[in-house]
Amino acid sequence: MITNQEKNIIHIYSCGIDFQITSFLKQLIKDVSYIYGSKNLLEKIANENTNAKKVAITAKAKEQAKEIIELSKNSTILILCSGDCLYNGFGGTLQKTLQENNLQANCIFYPHITAFQALFSRLGLAWENASLFTAHFSNALPLRKIIVEKMPVIYGGSKFLAHKIAQEIIIFDFTQKSRKSILADNLGTEKEYIFQGTLEEIQQKEVSPTSILVLLPYTLEYNQTEITHFQQKQALTLGLTEEVFEKENNLITQSDVRAIILSRLRLPKFGTMWDLGAGSGAVGLEVAGLTNIDVHGVEQNENRIHIIQNNQKNLGITNYTLHHGKILEIIPDLPKAHRIFIGGGGKDLPQILDNCIPNMYDNALLLVSAVTLENYHTLYAYKNAKLQKLDLLQIAISNENELAKIYHHFKQTNTIYLFIFKKI
């Protein structure tokens, strides 16, 4: 029985996949004022002794989280969650709502195993090397990051059922069609289904939104030529070749220069970066592909916007947000930055730098590339007490080139000047 000291608590109870009503849960169900859960879970407690008002959790989970927090001021609430409540469950939604709205509530979380843990247990498969992804509420899949992992586990959703995810992976990289994989659906129910085969076989199955797809690690039995192709095309992302990107009039930061820029950005694993004057999007998209940084690209030219969108889709990258408009107009709407790369700006460069500074974290790095002497002199003369110039690079790269079909010489590409600043 809930005592006076235990009132006004939100009990977030994980039901796992093999839901059982324990004596402890029976008591909670009896004593609380409100019970929230999916229609399926509420049906499973339909015969339990309680006077609580039962509320089905809907697609408007964020609004319901606020409702629950408000109710908890005067009531005790039980939330029933499938799997574990803190893995893509309502527990996480509740936590996020509390943080975003600077609210407080007395919450108790009860753990259980997730569907993927249950699947690995059924298969007798160790999961310490697993990398987890979810398509629960996604409009796009991070395909590049999925396929380079040793053993990715992808939760399906209403838009991306597991067999549809297999299709998307094969479209993205056809060499993946023979990769050994596991398909699971309706775990813990009478309709439980587990299938092991290739992605090509799995894409032909029909499963529900509760499905899971697991890509197994490569082994020696795989075609080594295909593995090499996969590693070169997909896995090794530093300095992707120009041919990978769609571009306008060869407007792209060359791969060798891009590799230097990425190195000098000293990329963290996560955070926020701006790519101002994005052009083809090559720098920002490659950062997004290498890390979990949230990259925000800004481009004014409408034709280049379409090019960047195509490149983002072709690279299978989701942690890149594109903004169409003038840099100075977009900056106030961007989240605070840990890294900034400026590849354009022209005559507005000094003003752009001035506007970047208040929107950067302390010790954040800002890199600006210049091709023209006009931009070089503008940047060299730029002074601001909050922006320390750490370094200035002159990048001149020459490639071997045939001359008169007999001789060879080095042909130099455009010289790039790279200014590296730090906010102090």
Image: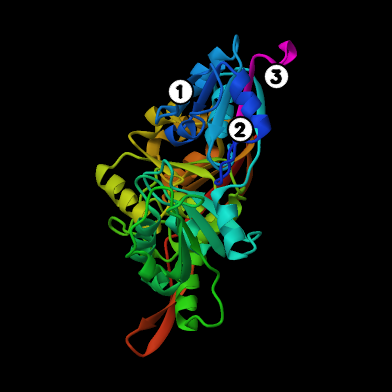
x 37%, y 82%: residue = 402
Mark 3–mark 2 distance (CA, rounded to whole Å): 17 Å
Q: Which label sits on residue 1?
A: 3
The x and y percentages for residue 366 are 56, 41
**Label 1 Cα crowd, 10 Å radius (few <14 / some 14-19 / many 20+):** some
User: In the figure, 234 relative to 281: above or below?
Assistant: below
The x and y percentages for residue 21 are 60, 36
Check disc 3 and give the amino acid type. Met
**Label 2 Cα crowd, 10 Å radius (few <14 / some 14-19 / many 20+):** many
Q: Nearer the viewer, residue 282 or 424?
A: 282
The x and y percentages for residue 64 are 47, 22
Check disc 1 and give the amino acid type. Val
Q: Earlier in the sequence, mark 3 or mark 2?
A: 3
Q: How does the figure colour the protein chain or chains?
A: rainbow
Which residues, given as a range, are shown in magenta?
Answer: 2-12
Mark 1–mark 2 distance (CA, rounded to whole Å): 15 Å
Residues marked 3 and 2 touching at CB (< 8 Å):
no
